[in-house]
Amino acid sequence: MTGYTIFWIIVIVFSITSFTYMSVKMLYRGIPELLEMFRRLRETRFNRNNKP
């Protein structure tokens, strides 16, 4: 019984750690891309509204 408990504790800790690492990594790389996308959308909207 103790073997199963230790095994599942290791699996859960590994899952939580890898999920947290990937989430932070995606946020770190994703936020600048998201800001760039919003900047391009704003420029596109500005250019459409100011066409003669």
Image (cartoon, grey):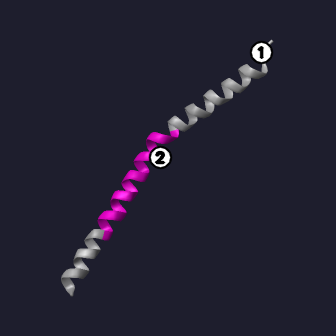
Q: Which residue is mark 1?
A: 51
Q: Secondary structure at mark 1?
A: loop
Whether the magenta-drawn stretch holds residue 19 is answered as yes
Count of numbered marks: 2
Residue 34 placement (x, y as % from top left): 55, 38
Q: Residues within 10 Å of mark 1 (few under 14, many from 20)?
A: few
Amino acid type at circle 2 is Leu
Magenta-colored span: 12-31
The quadrant the C terminus occupies is top right
Residue 38, horizontal then vertical, whole percent: 62, 34
* Alpha carbon separation for disc pair 2 and 1: 36 Å
**Residue 20: x and y, percent?**
40, 57
The image's mark for residue 35 is none
In contact (CB < 8 Å): disc 2 and disc 1: no
- Please state, as top left, top right, bottom left or bottom right, where the N terminus lies in the image: bottom left
Element class at badge 2: helix
Q: Which mark is residue 27?
A: 2
Going from N to C along the chain, the mark reached first, 2 or 1, is: 2
Q: Is residue 9 magenta?
A: no
Main secondary structure along the magenta-highlighted residues: helix
Q: Nearer the viewer, mark 2 or mark 1?
A: 1
Task: Please tell me which residue is depicted at 23% across the width and 75% down the height of the picture.
Answer: 7
Mark 2 crowd level (few <14, some 14–19, many ≥20, 10 Å Cα): few
The amino acid at mark 1 is: Lys
Residue drawn at (31%, 68%), measured in percent from left and top? 13
Q: Residue at x 28, y 74 (%)?
A: 9
Q: Where 17 sits versus 5, above or below? A: above
Q: Is residue 51 left or right of residue 27?
A: right
Q: Is residue 32 above or below residue 49?
A: below
